[in-house]
Amino acid sequence: MSEQGARTTDLTSAPRGRTWSRSTRWVLACLACVAAGVVLRYLLLETAHPPTKLSPPPRQGLNAPFITSPDLVVEKMVELACPTPSDLVYDLGCGDGRIVITAALKTGCRGVGFDIDPQRVAEARANVQLHEVADRVQIVEQDVFSVDLSRADVAMMYLLPWMMNKLLPQFAQMKPGCRIVSYEFWIDEIMPENIVETPAADGHIQRIYLYTTPLTKSPALEPGKPPVPSDLQSRSREVR
Ligand SMILES: C[S@@+](CC[C@H](N)C(=O)[O-])C[C@H]1O[C@@H](n2cnc3c(N)ncnc32)[C@H](O)[C@@H]1O
């Protein structure tokens, strides 16, 4: 064979060291097919179900958990609501009954505590017995959103922001001059009659809001923003 011919043969055949056997070529071909399948499946799934962006669960709909109001706060709430012995006080989400029982003990008013949780209802009923106010205080297992507020002179609560706003149509059932007292959470865009601030042990300011019915919207307040005592000046301007 000429030198030229030998060079041609060298170019068309694989170099000795890199020659793959038939079985190796099969294995490589199979691996390539599997890899292509994986890529294709990924692309198809991505297009059909784009990844869901995780967002925090909606707050709306989550009922207020059982967290008790501090004793000092309960006392202030009763002072602010100022029930008379002939008043009927509703405690919405009464927990262990501390608000309505304190109101009955301090003022002689009648009261009804409502709670959705049977365990809380049982505790509140036991506390009614313990404090001997069964002649004036009743505890009912009921969702606050189904309570008719037209008979209540005072409604007190420690719930959640969305619950305060959702209760608005029920607050509208209350007679003029009734009081709504809420710990921590306000009703969006409604100017309170009064705000009492008490410092907690950890330094955070605890607020208690007093509203009187009928509730009216105030242009001075922004939804989602708590009213603060300095906002009350604009209430007196609105009333004038
Ligand atoms: C933050 S705790 C307040 C308990 C008590 N009022 C206090 O101030 O110590 C809220 C209470 O509301 C009750 N609650 C939450 N959602 C409710 C609903 N939709 N209807 C009735 N009670 C509810 C809970 O079971 C819990 O006892």
Image (spheres, rainbow, N blue to C red):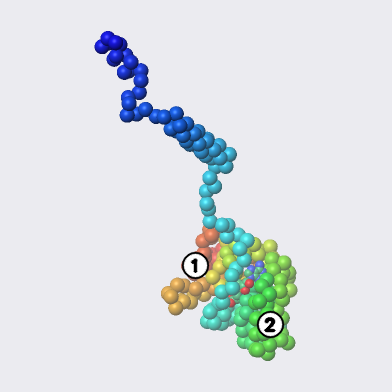
Q: Residue at x 68, y 88 (%)?
A: 129
Q: Amino acid at mark 2?
A: Arg
Q: Amino acid at mark 1?
A: Val
The image position of residue 62, as x and y in percent, is 61, 63
Q: Residue furthest left?
A: 3
Q: Which residue is mark 1?
A: 228
Image quarter of residue 171: bottom right
Q: Secondary structure at mark 2?
A: helix
Q: Are marks 2 and 1 in contact (CB under 8 Å)?
A: no
Q: Nearer the viewer, residue 217 or 93?
A: 93
The image position of residue 187, as x and y in percent, is 59, 64
The image position of residue 133, as x and y in percent, is 69, 87
Q: Is residue 13 above or below residue 208?
A: above
For the N terminus, the quadrant is top left
Q: Secondary structure at mark 1?
A: loop
Q: Quadrant of ligand 1?
A: bottom right
Please tell me how crowded label 1 is: few (under 14), some (14-19), or many (20+) other residues with Cα within 10 Å: some
Q: Which residue is mark 2?
A: 125
Q: Does residue 210 appear anywhere in the picture?
A: no
Which of disc 1 and disc 2 is earlier in sequence? 2
176 sits to left or right of 18: right
Q: Nearer the viewer, residue 124 or 42?
A: 42
Q: Is residue 97 above or below residue 147?
A: below
Image quarter of residue 2: top left
